[in-house]
Amino acid sequence: MKSHVDNKILGFDMDGVVINNNPLKLEFAKKLGYKLKITQTASEIIRKILSPEDLKSLQTALYHNLGVSMNADLMPGIVSLLSKIKERKIPYYLISRRAAPDIAIEYLKVKGLWPKYFNESNAFFVVEPIEKNIKAKELGITHYVDDETKILNVLEDVPNKFLFDHMNVFPEGNYAKVTSHEELAKYFLW
C-alpha cells in the first residue's frame, strides 16, 4: 500500500531556506553605514532599505564571493529535515536563483550537503524568478518552500507553496507560513 507521502515532490530555495545568511547581511549593511535590526535583513525587506548600489554590493559579496559565502550558517533543522526526507525516499529538489552556481555548490560541499543531499541530479540554478516555475513544473514539484513571497507568486504551477519566515516578520498571507524546519516537516513528512 502506497503512502500519501509518495505523491509529494518537494522543492527548496537555497538562500533563506537552506542557508541563513541574515547575520552576514546585517554585518555587511553595518559596514555600509546602515543601522538595521536582524529582522530587517529578510530579502524582501532589505531591498527596500538599501540603495540599489548597496544592494548590488551586498548581493555580489554574498553570492559571488566564496570567502564571504562560507561565513553563512545552515538554517537550524535543515540537515535533520533533509535526512528524514531522504530516508523516506520522498523526491526533492533545490531550485536556486544563483548566478554563480559554482560558489553555491562549493558552499554546499563545505557544509556537508553536497553530494549527500544535493547533487547534479536534484540541484538546479536559474536566474529569473519565472525560471523557478518552469523548472518546478518540469520536475512535477507539488510542495515548494521559499523565503520570498514574490517568488511564490510566480510559482503558478506549484499547488502547495510555503513561506519560510524564520524571523517571523511577515504577516499571514496567501501561503502557508512556517518559521522553522521542524514546522515545515509537519507538512512535508505527514
Image: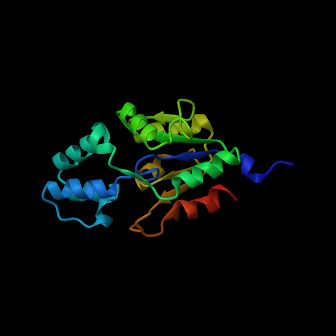
Horizontal and vertical percent position of residue 159:
61, 51
- Which residue occupies the foreground of this view, 65 or 167? 65
Q: Is residue 132 above or below residue 167?
A: above
Answer left or right for 122 relative to 88.
left
Q: Which residue appears at 64% of the width and 52% of the height?
A: 84
- Which residue occupies the foreground of this view, 67 or 42? 67
Horizontal and vertical percent position of residue 62:
29, 44
The residue at the far right in this view is 1
Answer left or right for 175 relative to 185.
left
User: To which quarter of the image does residue 56 belong?
Assistant: top left
Q: Which residue appears at 35% of the width and 33% of the height?
A: 100
Horizontal and vertical percent position of residue 164:
47, 59
- Which residue occupies the foreground of this view, 4 or 102? 102
Answer left or right for 148 relative to 78.
left
Q: Which residue appears at 31% of the width and 58% of the height?
A: 23
Can the viewer see residue 165 in this picture? Answer: yes
Quarter of the image where the C terminus is located: bottom right
Horizontal and vertical percent position of residue 45:
30, 60
**Type of colouring:** rainbow
Can the viewer see residue 130 in this picture? Answer: no
